[in-house]
Amino acid sequence: MLLGPVSFLSLAKTTDGSDPLALLDRLLPCYLELLKALAAAGASWVQLDEPLLATDLDEAARRAYARAFAALAPAPRPRLLLATYFGPLRENLDLALASGCEGLHLDLVRGAEDLEPALAGLPEGMVLSAGLVDGRNVWRSDLDAAARARVRRIAERIGPERLWLAPSCSLLHVPARPPPREAARSRAPVLARLRRAEARGAQAARHRPRGSRGRRRAPRRAADGRSPHGAPRRD
């Protein structure tokens, strides 16, 4: 994972009080050299974090992003996953979609509104990393039917081969040694359970007897006439 050049400079301070973004053209060759070295070392993907995209950008920042993406796109490098988090992109989504990166990660917990415009504008071949599991929540995730339905809808729109399931952000908020009963279920097993639950649901639907949906079986009674809860039977 690399912090992207524009977010890096936005967090920087200059000794003379000048605009840090003015240093972008001097910084970009360093990124190109680093990405080239990672490719030579065998890296196939590099995550490029640009959280600044989830904030309100002025025109100078938007121009900086355009220059940075134009410089990185044609370079000999690994494939790039452009990652944003902690909020929606809104009007900055067009910058991310036009970045030239091979993948885009969206925080769909705090930026769910980005999903539909992203699906509509996703370039051909770009992977969508769907941050559907809350990476900032230390408690057990609720993998309800709505979450599984969103996964199916995304896969139907762009194809399962272009869909990655992911936490909404990095897991730095999840304790290294969480409480044993709840937070110990880390985000990675949660994503695995989401995939398994979807497969089991589809299999169960195929093998369910016709007309069996909604039936409830009457509780059995013990041989002494008591109910399963211990209360005596009333005749």
Image (cartoon, rainbow, N blue to C red):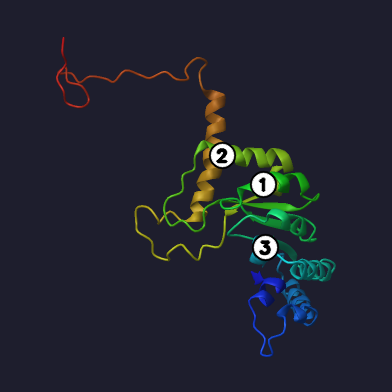
Q: Is residue 101 above or below residue 211?
A: below
Between label 2 and label 3, give the one nearer the viewer.
3
Residue at point 55% right, 30% down? 203
Where does label 1 land, which residue? 115
**Could you tell whether 58 is left or right of 210 in the image?**
right
Viewer-closest of 5 and 1: 5
Q: Secondary structure at mark 2?
A: helix
Residue 226 horizontal/vertical position (percent): 17, 20
**Quarter placement of the N terminus:** bottom right
Query: Does residue 27 show up?
Result: no
Q: CA distance from mark 2 to mark 3?
A: 31 Å
Q: Quadrant of residue 28?
A: bottom right
Horizontal side of residue 219 vs 211, given as left or right: left
Determine which of the numbered discs, if any, sits on residue 148 in the image. 2
The residue at the far top in this view is 235
Sooner in the amino-acid sequence: mark 2 or mark 1: 1
Q: Which mark is residue 56?
A: 3
